[in-house]
Amino acid sequence: MLILKDVSKLYQKNVVLNGVSYHFSDKKYCIVGPNGIGKTTVLMLAAGLESLSGGEVTFNDKSVFLTETKRYLGISSDKINLPGFLTAQQLLELHCSQHRCPFPTILINHLGFSAQLATQVSSLSLGNLKKVSLLLAVAHNPLCLLLDEPTTGLDSNSREWLLSFLNQYHGQVIVTSHEKVFTESAYYEHVDLTQLNKCNDIT
């Protein structure tokens, strides 16, 4: 279970999140809200990739900033800068080595990414960057997937496969999206960050 407790985040003097609390206890969630409300920031904090300005974030009662906890989390976000000097295969191999998991050949085939494995990350198109980001998120079969706009930039075949994959995923799935396939889906419980974020209460 992912829990946010009184979470706040400031970038310099800009308050992005203030007093956000939520228990993600069910299987699938879609975080909704207007651009700039802090949806991506919530995912980055939940993955332990950005520091907190206040509050705490835990997964299964342990801080998400612990190395042992991060092994249970997988994140895909355009906000994460991937090392451009590596090829896609080298990056995936490094990830699999760190997580002690098999190379995700089957997932690569489903996403139609085999031909791009030898390409440097810096030379990948936006759509293929999305694919390698998704592969990094799911390769180690995490208990909790954190996916920021996961279908953006995907071709139709990859998009269709991903949606089916997520609907059947055994672990927890938390996405941010403006797409109706998520925002109006019965599979996903919808969390309106506008109602949780108390930024507007700051005077």
Image (tube, rainbow, N blue to C red):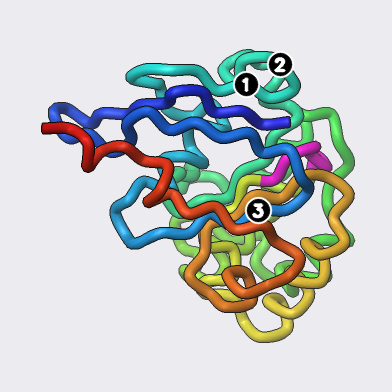
Front residue of this view, candidates 1 and 105: 1
Q: Amino acid at mark 1?
A: Thr
Q: Residue at x 71, y 76 (%)?
A: 158
State the residue position of label 1. 58
Mark nearer the N terminus (1 vs 3): 3
Mark 1 residue element = strand
Relative to residue 192, is residue 165 drawn left or right? right
Q: Amino acid at mark 2?
A: Asp
Label 3: few (<14), some or many (≥20) within 10 Å?
Answer: many
Q: Residue at x 59, y 58 (%)?
A: 190
- Residue 149: image x %, image y %? 52, 62
Determine whether label 1 and label 2 are within 8 Å by CB: yes
Q: Residue at x 55, y 52 (%)?
A: 191
Label 1: few (<14), some or many (≥20) within 10 Å?
Answer: many
Relative to residue 54, is residue 10 drawn left or right? left
Mark 3 residue element = strand
State the residue position of label 3. 29
Determine whether label 3 and label 2 are within 8 Å by CB: no
Mark nearer the N terminus (3 vs 2): 3
- Residue 53: image x %, image y %? 33, 19
Front residue of this view, candidates 109 and 181: 181
Which dot marks residue 9? none
Tell me how far mark 1 sits from mark 3, CA to CA: 17 Å
Residue 72: in magenta span? no
**What's drawn in magenta, residue-wise?**
140-145
State the residue position of label 2. 61
Front residue of this view, candidates 29 and 83: 29
Tell me how far mark 1 sits from mark 2, CA to CA: 5 Å
Q: Amino acid at mark 3?
A: Tyr
Q: Quadrant of residue 159?
A: bottom right
Relative to residue 6, is residue 172 drawn left or right? right
- Residue 27: image x %, image y %? 78, 48
